[in-house]
Image (cartoon, coloured by chain):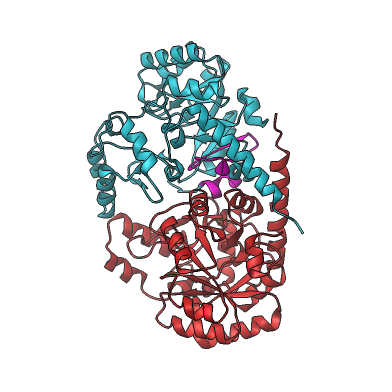
Chain colours: A red, B cyan
């Protein structure tokens, strides 16, 4: 398949595995890239030295295109950016911050730079500063989320109308029917998170993977809206956050409730009581833990099958 | 075009105009049915006598299939149901209540009965009681909404997997690209609300129509969650509700704040200060007030155009 997204990255299928803290290390990223998609190492949970190690290991495991996700709000993000460049990565997905931050540095090093946004306004900004593509991520996405609460169905066609650069759809996409839906809306690629968290190569704790498989419709919730909106599986901590919100807890109280390292305690250590488990509404479509290459293959099979079905719908 | 939905209703295009309080009277419903879709008279804002009058006028204006939307939670809904049957309507869309309520009455009269749901669990219930089809409506939809907050992109494939009856997708759908996306997800028809509210034949106040045209990304909000979640355009009253919610207002306080008749004051009377304006996230894709027949034509043109584009995406 050929789209501007496959051309931009030099990949076979327009499927990008989202950079996910504590979940997408070198093993997952290399497996996705080897399968014809684009694997992203999630730098958000790594110190620069650890990121360098993950890049080296991924490089040893695949000679295919490979990227890094860089959360721009982190204090030491410049070190992560320099590590990414120094280690020879030439595809950077940036998020959570101003898209122009470090853009000259990345572009000077020859990187393709893509920024993740939750709204039309931000997508226009991403294009105006000179990014090569934009990931438009809907309300149903796992993890951090925008204030507009615009869903993937509503967001993608608006972003496609508003910018010229290629649009990658994200948010709730876990199967190939949804991938085709994203293409119908005008996207030229998809970024898939939660489905790849439940793979053999993901570094998520086995209890997190199991939670994803068991979760159904309505089992995630967007919470901590006054702090930084985040979509979590409805575990004990998530429900405490929901209750605090319902009684009008302010930003300070929510910050205290959140404390520190809940992402690690949940997704990496499997603490079902105190941890955070970031996942999108697509959890409900994930019913098994598979090798990442099998996920890529299924996505493409379902995409082509759905396309065939839609084609066959008879016209008069 | 032929799907189980077009067959079920005997219509040309799988496009259903949502029943909308204060907005979809006989003029809009007849115009949509004449254009090849299925028009629904929204009984939610009508007394039985007024509903009878609207049905008679619609019948005089079209000989095409025509339906009525019946909100099952209303105290006098049985009168609305009997009026619908007595006036010769044979297509009923029910919502907001138990799908089995009055189902025998409607089925005995020979009606096709469809129920609107926000979740997979409810869709299974709808099938089990014997409805003919289900409308699965996502979080981005205007007006009343479910507690699960499942988006159209996440909801439709789950419902399609869970039931055998035909699935009609709703929530945020305002153009033909989104209609194709719904089909990619497995829907066999779409229900479109907000786009039809901004038509010449809609009985919405001109200021409401203008608000829809002017609204962009992020200009609607889901609020009154503790009472009955509803998606509104961000006007003065909506923002008061949002503020009350943020400081933890309870159900009683929200009920008092809401008071009565805000839907009428907003959508029918155009009171931008005190009224409610129910609209989905699709507002951002509505840029003009058109005749309803032109909306049907555009939806189909865009649908077919998007299908052609998706087809042409090259395989290797």
Query: Which image quadrant: the N terminus of chain A?
Result: bottom right
**Position of residue B21 in the picture relative to residue B162 (left or right):** left
**Position of residue B302 in the picture relative to residue A253 (left or right):** right
Quadrant of the rendered structure where residue A242 is?
Answer: bottom left
- State which region is magenta: B152-179
Residue at the image point whose x is 62% and y is 34% from the top: B166
Specify whether residue A16 is in view. Answer: yes
Query: Does the stretch in magenta take in A110?
Result: no
Residue at the image point whose x is 53% and y is 86% from the top: A83
From the viewer's side, name the closer residue of B208 and A221: B208
Query: Does the stretch in magenta take in B178?
Result: yes
From the viewer's side, name the closer residue of B69 and A213: B69
How far across and down, in percent of the image, does residue B306 sit? 62, 44
A6 versus B301 height, above or below: below
How far across and down, in percent of the image, does residue B9 sit? 60, 24
**Position of residue A57 in the picture relative to residue A142 (left or right):** right
């Amino acid at each position: 398949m050929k789209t501007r997204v496959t051309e931009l990255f030099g990949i076979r299928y327009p499927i990008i595995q989202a950079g996910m803290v504590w979940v997408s290390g070198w093993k997952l990223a290399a497996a996705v890239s080897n399968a014809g998609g684009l694997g992203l190492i999630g730098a958000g949970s790594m110190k620069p030295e650890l990121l360098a190690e993950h890049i080296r290991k991924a490089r040893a495991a695949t000679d295919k295109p490979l990227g890094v996700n860089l959360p721009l709000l982190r204090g030491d993000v410049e070190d992560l950016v320099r590590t990414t460049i120094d280690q020879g990565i030439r595809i950077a997905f940036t998020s959570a911050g101003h898209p122009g931050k470090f853009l000259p540095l990345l572009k000077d090093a020859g990187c393709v730079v893509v920024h993740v946004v939750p709204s039309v306004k931000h997508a226009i900004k991403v294009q105006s500063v000179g990014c090569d593509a934009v990931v438009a991520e809907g309300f149903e996405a796992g993890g951090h989320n925008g204030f507009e609460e615009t869903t993937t169905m509503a967001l993608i066609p608006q972003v496609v109308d508003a910018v010229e650069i290629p649009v990658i759809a994200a948010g709730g996409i876990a199967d190939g029917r949804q991938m085709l839906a994203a293409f119908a809306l005008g996207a030229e690629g998809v970024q898939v998170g939660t489905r790849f968290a439940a793979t053999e190569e993901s570094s998520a704790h086995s209890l997190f993977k199991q939670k994803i498989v068991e979760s159904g419709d309505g089992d995630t919730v967007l919470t901590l809206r006054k702090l930084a909106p985040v979509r979590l599986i409805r575990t004990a901590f998530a429900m405490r956050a929901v209750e605090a919100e319902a009684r009008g807890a302010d930003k300070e109280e929510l910050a205290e409730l959140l404390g520190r390292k809940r992402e690690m305690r949940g997704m990496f250590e499997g603490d079902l009581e105190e941890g955070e488990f970031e996942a999108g509404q697509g959890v409900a479509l994930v019913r098994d833990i598979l090798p990442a290459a099998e996920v890529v293959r299924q996505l493409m099979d379902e995409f082509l099958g759905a396309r065939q079905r839609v084609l066959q719908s008879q016209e008069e």
